[in-house]
Amino acid sequence: MRVLLVEDDADLSRQLKMALGDAGYAVDHAADGEEAHYLGDTEPYDVIVLDLGLPKIDGVSVLERWRREGKTTPVLILTARGAWSDKVSGFDAGADDYLTKPFHTEELLARLRALLRRSAGIASATLSCGGLRLDPRAARASVNGEPLRLTSLEYRLLHYMMMHQGRVISRTELVEHLYDQDFDRDSNTIEVFVGRLRKKIGSDRIETVRGLGYRLTPLTGESEAA
Amino acid sequence: MRVLLVEDDADLSRQLKMALGDAGYAVDHAADGEEAHYLGDTEPYDVIVLDLGLPKIDGVSVLERWRREGKTTPVLILTARGAWSDKVSGFDAGADDYLTKPFHTEELLARLRALLRRSAGIASATLSCGGLRLDPRAARASVNGEPLRLTSLEYRLLHYMMMHQGRVISRTELVEHLYDQDFDRDSNTIEVFVGRLRKKIGSDRIETVRGLGYRLTPLTGESEAA
DNA sequence: CCCACGGCTGAGCCTGATCTGAACAGCGCA
DNA sequence: TGCGCTGTTCAGATCAGGCTCAGCCGTGGG
């Protein structure tokens, strides 16, 4: 999952970036409203953490512009405590959740998880697909009850695919969601990792759609190759 | 485990802080409602001990604010008066337990243990995981019946991990729950202690999840009696 | 049938994360 | 005050995961 962190305070930024990184997110950081707006327009984030007090362009304005432009990425707003009016205008502008500073990282992480879950339209806390199960909280996955031993990237890949099971996902999309900005686009890591993942979860789970990308097949339907 | 102690009486504060410290908690102290609210918002406590008669902001108000903000940390309320009305308003405000002054430290500790247990969704008084057992009352742990000789930090580390067995726990989270406010975040003590703990409980018990943290593996296959 | 294009794979390198042993400092207890 | 135990730091050693590369394979179009 890829997250845009918009926060001007250097200390807090560093701290949050680290925490989000620890939690397995690919994090991009914007320090002012202009940069935030630019990045939000350019890159496909799964969720955005937006501080309201920003240089150049105010956070609420940025959010309003995104929403006017039709962007639906879930946004969690941060603000200094006590600012009631901020809270109201933030929600009015289209925020999905709200967190008052100071807060502790765990709560932020919990709320982000909730947002991501909600935005994917999935209700339960654990994702499942065929015999596959994945519990984001424990960072753990299993096939038919058999626990999987996945590396960090394998896990993130599977996570993303499970959140979008049944849809064809292009290599580009995967790269964009699994890595942060600077990544060598013409590498074949994705292929390599899809391969490794197949080896672990069973090669029939991930279908390759030539020229388009991959699809995690929701059903265990055997009827494919005839 | 980390506890926030909110108490304005200097003597009692000192005494409780010492008792809690002895019991293996990392303790932060707030002397008035404002500080309490701030700390409670900022730091991830496992439990909060809240005196009702406070300067600046009343205890019940602080609690109400926390609950309104969605904080779910278990709170134990202290009050001087045995007054029923206090008790009721305390519970109405979202307290999880209640203790009337004067009380025996023992009772406080017992109630805190109960709160912690409940909040982690654990039923029995002793924690167990594979051949591992830990009894918070006696502050004692064992592997396969063999008693362990743990230092304070080792014990606290194990305790926290057993309360959250099966979940991946990041180094950051461990630091935040084992230490109080001021602690050098980029030290490798955690790694060192995980290492020492492994040496004592068997190295296969704590799994390291690269880039994410550690996990206490819940099952070795056999079921537990108790 | 042949070619070109994607996609797949195994091997191996490199980097950064993790582990470890040893030494040092603080503190309580005798 | 001296001893012993704890927690912390540091500097290598170690190791695993991620990335690249090069070559193979299957497919579809001519």
Image (cartoon, coloured by chain):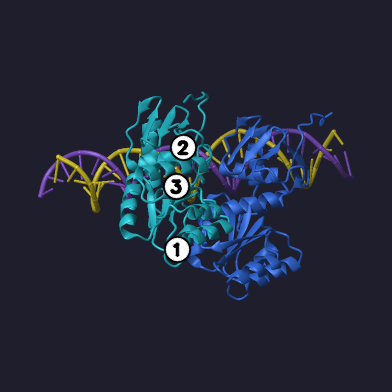
Chain colours: A blue, B cyan, C yellow, D purple
Label 3 Cα crowd, 10 Å radius (few <14 / some 14-19 / many 20+): some
Q: Where is residue D22 in the image (x, y as percent from the top left)?
A: 62, 42
**Chain letter belonging to callout 3:** B
Quick one: A89 or B19, which is closer to the camera?
A: B19
Which of pointers 2 and 1 lies earlier in the amino acid sequence? 1
In whole angstroms, how far apart are the C-alphas of marks 1 and 3?
27 Å
Residue shown at the point (37%, 39%) measured from the top left? B155
In whole angstroms, how far apart are the C-alphas of marks 2 and 1?
33 Å
Single out the mark in the foreground, 2 or 3: 2
- Classify residue A180 as left or right of residue A66: left
- Classify residue B108 as left or right of residue B215: left
Q: Name the residue under label 1.
A: B33
Quick one: B90 or A22, which is closer to the camera?
A: B90
Whether labels 2 and 3 belong to a single chain: the reply is yes
Residue shown at the point (35%, 45%) measured from the top left? B104
Which of pointers 2 and 3 lies earlier in the amino acid sequence? 2
Single out the mark in the foreground, 1 or 3: 1
Q: Name the residue under label 2.
A: B162
Residue type at the position of mark 3: Leu
Residue type at the position of mark 1: Gly
Q: Name the residue under label 3.
A: B174
Q: Where is residue A51 in the image (x, y as percent from the top left)?
A: 59, 66
